[in-house]
Amino acid sequence: MAKLGELERQVMDVLWGAGSETMTVRTVVASFPDHAYTTLLTVLDRLAAKGLVHRTMVGRAYQYAAAATREDYTSSLLHEVLAETTDARAALVRFAETISDEEAAHLRDALDEARTNRP
Amino acid sequence: MSTALFAALSIVCLVVAPRPLASANWATRSPRAGLLAWYALGAAGLLSLLGTGLSMAFVHHDTSLRTAMRAFLSGVCHHHLLASLGVREAVGLTLATDVALVVLGGLVTTSASTVLRRRRHRMVLNVISTSAPGAEVLEHPAIAAYCLPGRRPRIVVSRGTIDLLDPAELGAVLAHERGHAEGHHGLVLLPFASLLQVLSFLPYAALAPRATALLVELAADDAAARTSDRHTLASALLSMATAGTNRAPRCALGASEAAVGLRVHRLLGRDRPSMPHLASSAACSVMVLLAPLACAVVR
């Protein structure tokens, strides 16, 4: 399972590397000389089932492409992390909120004071 | 008599007590004691609400809910269940079943949607994150560090955060996130999120999510302070709260500003966490939980 997961990640990298162009299993396999055709077919099917990859039939072969760019996925995760809705917040435990500059300056002074006073 | 006791107890737990608890100093000093108190209050309040309905339905004059329920159950066995169901009984029975269904239903739906959301998040994370010592990295300039709860919790930090903080500060932030993971804080907060979905008109359900979210942050700060320097964590907190492209709109700042201020002042070491708070909160919680049971045996 862990190996398949790692392979999924590498296949996504290859698809993202191809930009907006679609790839057949055969062109994907070219990037993975150590893996069998069927293994990569399985990985691509799994990624398609997860919605990470779009699959279209062109002629007699499937063409694969990443469903969204890596940047889009990153933004969507961070959007979820920084969202204010309790629904999204329940799913994660995030680190920090934002504060105003005045409050920050005030707290920074308190911190500096505590640091200089420390024995 | 027992109906009135149950009703009074549920009002105390779900309407009167939440506000003072949300602003209690002892809770922010000992966040685990505070969390325990929120749990006890909620459980006692909801049990009392259930008890109010049940005693309306089954208690007549001078019996206790316990004896009335026993009589009812023997009635069920002898198949004359709803023979003498009046208006009062019907209202009570409706209240009791509604409370039970709404609370359990809310818990199930919130758990399910949270699990799905986390699964989707984990699935995307699996293919886009790069690994670094102690965390996974999202290549993005935004400021974010978080823990994705689950059987194998994931600690994630953005490239923007790594660039912003010095190594000691980053270490403190990751220790804070490990505190969330080890304390199972995602699970701790889940019931409060689900109550907000179904009973938001109750002061308890409205106040508990934000109050408990703050308490788990404080608990994670305490966990981080065991391995990292408190002032370093405070400094990281301030840097992250003021930096970056994700500043919240001005109108939304109030409560979070108070939270960051509270955490920084706490990390500067004036209020150390204290064990007596946890012990006394545990004792009080047990007593609060015993109250609805006492109401069930009183006449």
Image (cartoon, coloured by chain):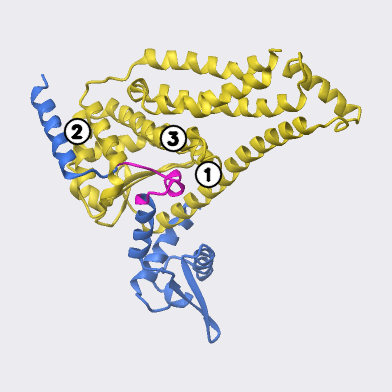
Chain colours: A blue, B yellow
- Mark 1 or mark 3: whose residue is earlier in sequence: 1
Q: Secondary structure at mark 2?
A: helix
The amino acid at mark 2 is Thr
The quadrant of the rendering that contains the C terminus of chain B is: top right
How far from the left and from the top, in percent, is residue B134?
A: 31, 41
Circle 3 — which element? Answer: helix
Bounds of the magenta span?
Answer: A82-96
Q: Residues within 10 Å of mark 1 (few under 14, many from 20)?
A: many
Asked if residue A94 is among those painted magenta in the image, a careful observer would answer yes
Residue at numbered disc 3: B207
- Give, as a three-letter code, the residue at label 3: Leu
Give how far apart the Cα atoms at labels 3 and 2 are.
31 Å
Q: Are the residues at dot 2 and dot 1 in contact (C-beta closer than 8 Å)?
A: no
Tell which subunit mark 2 falls on: B
Residue in the image at 14% along x and 35% along y: A106
In reply to whether residue B88 is colored magenta, the answer given is no
B67 to B203, vertically: above or below: above
Residue B229 shows in the view: no
- What label sits on residue B297 in the rendered view? none
The subunit carrying tag 3 is: B
Residue tagged by mark 1?
B197
Can you tell which quarter of the image residue B139 is in? bottom left
Name which quarter of the figure residue B208 lies in.
top left
| Residue B232: assigned label | 2
- Is residue B212 shown above or below B293? below
Q: How many marks?
A: 3
